[in-house]
């Protein structure tokens, strides 16, 4: 019986060469173990996805209520530029034209 030929996997993923060690509570370890079991992801992939989501939420602005209304009104009917803003734009154009 011939021995199977190992093929090199080619993916677009970055090579995993870095290591991250954590001390966590037993309950956190169990939660991560369960999440890896149901998702099929590795613990490292779960950490990456969690970090990506945190940054996505941090970078996204969510306005509600009065804040949303003020923002939308400013977009619909912007106020005229102040003299200071006009002067700043003139200086910018003179410098970076």
Image (tube, rainbow, N blue to C red):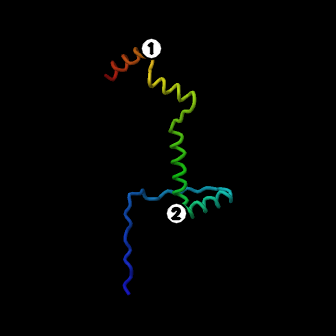
Distance from label 1 to label 2 (Cα)?
Answer: 56 Å
**SS at circle 1:** loop
**Quadrant in the picture for residue 9:** bottom left
The image shows a total of numbered marks equal to 2
Q: Quick check: 77 left or right of 23?
A: left
Residue 40 disc label: 2
- Residue at screen point 61% across, 62% down: 34
Question: On the rendered image, what quadrant is the N terminus found in?
Answer: bottom left
Query: Decide: marks 1, 2 in contact (CB < 8 A)?
Result: no
**Quadrant in the picture for residue 64:** top right
Image position of 51 with respect to 82: above or below:
below
- Residue at screen point 58% across, 60% down: 35
Image position of 7 with respect to 43: above or below:
below
Question: On the rendered image, what quadrant is the C terminus found in?
Answer: top left
Q: Position of residue 6 (x, y in %)?
A: 38, 74
Quick one: label 1, few (<14), some, or many (20+) residues within 10 Å? Answer: few
Q: Position of residue 20 (x, y in %)?
A: 55, 56
Q: Nearer the viewer, residue 29 or 91?
A: 29
Quick one: label 2, few (<14), some, or many (20+) residues within 10 Å? Answer: few
| The residue positioned farthest toward the left in the image shown | 97
Residue 72 disc label: none
Q: Nearer the viewer, residue 56 or 25?
A: 56
Image position of 5 with respect to 32: above or below:
below
**Quadrant in the picture for residue 7:** bottom left
**SS at circle 2:** loop
Q: Which residue is mark 1?
A: 82
- Residue at screen point 63% across, 59% down: 31
Q: Nearer the viewer, residue 32 or 22?
A: 32
Q: Nearer the viewer, residue 46 or 64?
A: 64
Image position of 83 with respect to 1: above or below:
above
């Amino acid at each position: 019986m011939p021995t199977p030929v190992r093929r090199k996997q080619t993916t677009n993923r970055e090579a995993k060469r870095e290591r991250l060690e954590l001390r966590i509570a037993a309950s956190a370890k169990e939660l991560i173990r369960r999440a890896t079991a149901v998702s099929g992801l590795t613990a490292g992939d779960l950490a990456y996805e969690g970090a990506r989501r945190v940054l996505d939420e941090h970078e996204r602005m969510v306005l509600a209520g009065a804040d949303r209304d003020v923002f939308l009104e400013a977009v619909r009917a912007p106020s005229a530029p102040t003299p200071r803003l006009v002067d700043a734009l003139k200086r910018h154009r003179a410098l970076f034209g």
